[in-house]
Image (spheres, rainbow, N blue to C red):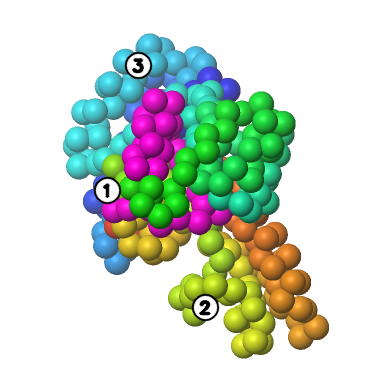
C-alpha cells in the first residue's frame, strides 16, 4: 500500500484524535489504522496512525510538511514514515545461530520489511550461514585489548552501510556507553528472562537447580544500563518437573526466537514509541 505511518506523542488534551483525523480527511487521506494510548499517570498521549495516501489531494511531502502546524499546536513530537519501505538492518552475532536463522527465515518470508546489509560477528562461526544467504559477513576480532578497536570498526560498518537498526542476535559482548548513546533507540537485544535472578555462566543450570516453573526471553532496546532498556516483547514457557537443563535450553531458544522476531517486527513497522524507560507498543 502507498501510504504513511505517523507516530505521535504529546501532552494529553481534548480533541487530539478528532484534530488528527480531520487533518487527514481534509486532504482526502484514508485512515487505515488509528491506535492510541493515554498514560493517565503522566498525562501523555501516544498514537500510531496508518494513512492510505492513494487519493491524497496534495503531494505527500506537502502533506507531511503541512502537519507541522497541527503538531506544534499539540506540543507534540511526531515522525512520518513513507510506505512501502525496507529498514536497513545489521545483525550482530557471536556463536549461537538460532536467532539469526529466525531473522533470516522471517525476512525471506516477507514478514519483516528489512534489508539485511550485513552480519557482523566477533567469531566466524556464523559465516557459512551468511554465505548461504548471500549476505556479507564481517569478522571483527574483539578479544582482549582489541575490544575498543572492534567496537570502533563495528561503528564504522554501521555508518558506511547506513544502518537504521542493529539487532544483537545473541551477540555476547557488552556495548560501551558511547556506542549505546550514538545509536540510541536503534539497537535491539534479546536475552533470557532470568535476569537478574540467575546472573553469569550457565543460567539454565542455575534455573534447573532452583526448580523454576517459568522461563522466557526478553527483547528490549539497548541503553547504557546493561539489560535494563525499554522492553518491547517477552515470551514465556512453562517448565515441568521432568524437564532437564537441556530441555530448558531448548524451550529458552524457542522463546528467544519468537520474542526477537516480534520485537523486530514491531520496531520496523513503527509500532513502538520510547518514552523514558518504557516502550509503548501497538501490537499488530
Contact between marks 3 and 1 (CB within 8 A): the answer is no
Above or below: residue 165 compared with residue 134:
below
Q: Is residue 258 magenta?
A: no
Q: Earlier in the sequence, mark 1 or mark 2?
A: 1
Task: Identify the mark at residue 210; answer none if there is no mark.
Answer: none
Q: Nearer the viewer, residue 212 or 203?
A: 203
Measured from the top left, where is residue 218 in percent x and y?
Answer: 53, 62
In the displayed structure image, the side of residue 152 where residue 112 appears, left or right: right
Q: Which segment is the magenta one?
A: 149-177
Q: Earlier in the sequence, mark 3 or mark 1?
A: 3
Question: Is residue 268 in sight in this rendering?
Answer: no
Residue beneath disc 2: 198
The structure residue drawn at horizontal position 51% and vertical position 25%, both measured from the top left corner, is 85
Disc 3 is placed on an element classified as helix
The structure residue drawn at horizontal position 42% and vertical position 63%, both measured from the top left corner, is 227
Q: Tell me which corner region of the image, top left, top right, bottom left or bottom right, holds residue 124.
A: top right
Residue beneath disc 3: 61
Residue beneath disc 1: 178
Measured from the top left, where is residue 211 in percent x and y?
Answer: 66, 87
In which quadrant is the N terminus drawn?
A: top right
Contact between marks 2 and 3 (CB within 8 A): the answer is no
Q: Tell me which corner region of the image, top left, top right, bottom left or bottom right, holds residue 237.
A: bottom right
The structure residue drawn at horizontal position 57% and vertical position 33%, both measured from the top left corner, is 137
Mark 3 packing: few (<14 Cα in 10 Å), some, or many (20+)?
few
Q: Nearer the viewer, mark 3 or mark 1?
A: 1
Measured from the top left, where is residue 259 in percent x and y?
Answer: 60, 56
Q: Nearer the viewer, mark 2 or mark 3?
A: 2
Amino acid at each position: 500500500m502507498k501510504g504513511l505511518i505517523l507516530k505521535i506523542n504529546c501532552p494529553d488534551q481534548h480533541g487530539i484524535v478528532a484534530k488528527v483525523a480531520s487533518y487527514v480527511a481534509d486532504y482526502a487521506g484514508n485512515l487505515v489504522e488509528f491506535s492510541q494510548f493515554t498514560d493517565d499517570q503522566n498525562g501523555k498521549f501516544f498514537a500510531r496512525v496508518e494513512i492510505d495516501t492513494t487519493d491524497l489531494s496534495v503531494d505527500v511531502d506537502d502533506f507531511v510538511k503541512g502537519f507541522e502546524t497541527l503538531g506544534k499546536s499539540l506540543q507534540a513530537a511526531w515522525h512520518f514514515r513513507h510506505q512501502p519501505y525496507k529498514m536497513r538492518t545489521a545483525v550482530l552475532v557471536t556463536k549461537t545461530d538460532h536467532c539469526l536463522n529466525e531473522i533470516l527465515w522471517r525476512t525471506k518470508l516477507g514478514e519483516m520489511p528489512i534489508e539485511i546489509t550485513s552480519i557482523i560477528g566477533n567469531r566466524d562461526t556464523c559465516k557459512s550461514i551468511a554465505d548461504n544467504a548471500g549476505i556479507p559477513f564481517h569478522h571483527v576480532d574483539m578479544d582482549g585489548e582489541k575490544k575498543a578497536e572492534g567496537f570502533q570498526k563495528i561503528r564504522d560498518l554501521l555508518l558506511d552501510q547506513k544502518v537504521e537498526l542493529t539487532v544483537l542476535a545473541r551477540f555476547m559482548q557488552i556495548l560501551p556507553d558511547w556506542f549505546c548513546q550514538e545509536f540510541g533507540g536503534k539497537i535491539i537485544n534479546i536475552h533470557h528472562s532470568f535476569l537478574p535472578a540467575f546472573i553469569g555462566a550457565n543460567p539454565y543450570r542455575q534455573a534447573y537447580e532452583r526448580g523454576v516453573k517459568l522461563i522466557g526471553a526478553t527483547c528490549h532496546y539497548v541503553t547504557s544500563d546493561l539489560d535494563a532498556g525499554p522492553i518491547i516483547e517477552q515470551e514465556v514457557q512453562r517448565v515441568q518437573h521432568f524437564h532437564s537443563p537441556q530441555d530448558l535450553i531448548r524451550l529458552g531458544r524457542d522463546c528467544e526466537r519468537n520474542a526477537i522476531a516480534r520485537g523486530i517486527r514491531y520496531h520496523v513497522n513503527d509500532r513502538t514509541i520510547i518514552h523514558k524507560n518504557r516502550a509503548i507498543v501497538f501490537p499488530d
